[in-house]
Image (spheres, rainbow, N blue to C red):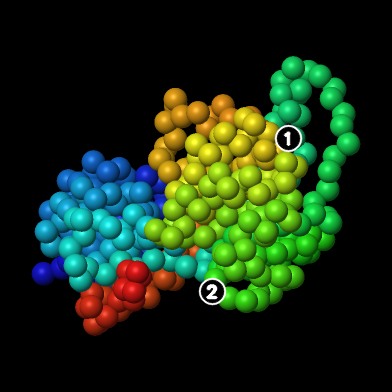
Amino acid sequence: MSKTIIISHETREWTDDYVTRLGPMFPGFDFRAAYSLDEARQLAPEAHAIIGMGPHMPADLIGAMPRLEWVQTLTTGIDNFRHMDTLRPGIPVTRVTGKHGPQVSETAILLMMALARRLPDTLAAQRDKRWDRRPQPVLAGKTLCIFGLGSIAETLALYADTMGMRVTGISDGRSSAPHVSRVYPRADLAQAVGEADFLVVLVPLTEATRNIINADVLAAMKPTAFLVNVARGGCVDEAALRDALVAGQIAGAGMDVFAQEPLPADDPMWTAPNTIITPHIAGFADVYAEQCLPVVIDNLTIYAQQGAAALPDALKGQ
């Protein structure tokens, strides 16, 4: 009897492509497409495994899978699974790492440039048909501080260094990194951000990093500095950030992620001054499904040949 595996994603092209390509490679599995949570819930009672983005696998869906043996998230972050009560002990959660560097780094630089050059003001002038010329600041010579020095940070550091920026980092896990001139421990967070023109947040969301960018950290930043968060929304205290923006404590913020997503229409961050909001798209590249596929195939091979227990469970040791 074949095992049912749900491929869950709202992008129909991605989902259909996975089902079409994986089916012939793994004839012992029955791949089923789900383009919405409602469709995934209908398939849940028969599913032995699910492949999809973390937000497409909420606790109620996982809890509705009595046969579940394995969860494959196509994200790097697994914070939503760490304390998921409906995820039975022993069920492995595998993830995709090392693929997001180019797209997340490009998004971070896009937000840095748009904030520094006041792109929203330029677009507003275009809508008003105003010819509004201003001297444009350059990133070369500015200091970028990257909080969290994983693989994505290495790509961002390379890009920033190539553009002529000075790059520093904050990490307790390593004392040096390519293209990073100095690494500060987290204990020196205030000093590190105080020297930066741009602070880019790239740490995973854990209990230790929840709201770690708080009022004290924001107060330590220069009033001309910008904050960019392309990590997880919970890493930044959004109420403190809005207060800092309103008070002019920092020059602006580029926010790709939020504690609650989608960001509610009445959330005050929508109207925070000098803020650019993007809808959690930093890692959501047009090539991402193809980037993830080799990881999915490797894990499906392990699952088919050795069983779920042999899979590299990202939750172990968390």
Farthest residue, direction top:
128
Residue 54 visible to the viewer: yes
Identify the residue at image location x=25%, y=56%: 84
- Between 40 and 104, the one lying in front of the other is 104
Q: Amino acid at mark 1?
A: Leu
Expressed as whole percent of the image width and height from the top left, the position of residue 216 reads: 58, 48
Vertical arrangement, residue 268 with respect to residue 143, above or below? above
Vertical arrangement, residue 174 with respect to residue 79, above or below? below
Q: Are marks 1 and 2 in contact (CB under 8 Å)?
A: no
Q: Tag 2: Cα neighbours inside 10 Å, few (<14), some, or many (≥20)?
A: few
- Between 192 and 3, the one lying in front of the other is 192
Identify the residue at image location x=61%, y=37%: 244
Using the image, tell me which numbered label, if any, was put on residue 152: none
Using the image, tell me which numbered label, if any, was put on residue 119: 1
Provide the residue designation for mark 2: 173
- Between 36 and 194, the one lying in front of the other is 194
Expressed as whole percent of the image width and height from the top left, the position of residue 89 reads: 19, 67
Q: Nearer the viewer, mark 1 or mark 2?
A: 2
The quadrant where residue 75 appears? bottom left
Expressed as whole percent of the image width and height from the top left, the position of residue 156 reads: 66, 62
First in sequence: mark 1 or mark 2?
Answer: 1
- Between 290 and 49, the one lying in front of the other is 49
Q: Tag 1: Cα neighbours inside 10 Å, few (<14), some, or many (≥20)?
A: some
Identify the residue at image location x=68%, y=45%: 226
Secondary element under disc 2, as helix, strand or loop, is loop
Expressed as whole percent of the image width and height from the top left, the position of residue 125 reads: 76, 23
Q: Amino acid at mark 2?
A: Gly
Residue 289 visible to the viewer: no
Distance from Cα at disc 1 to Cα at disc 2: 36 Å
Q: Quadrant of the N terminus?
A: bottom left
Q: Is residue 145 left or right of residue 284?
A: right
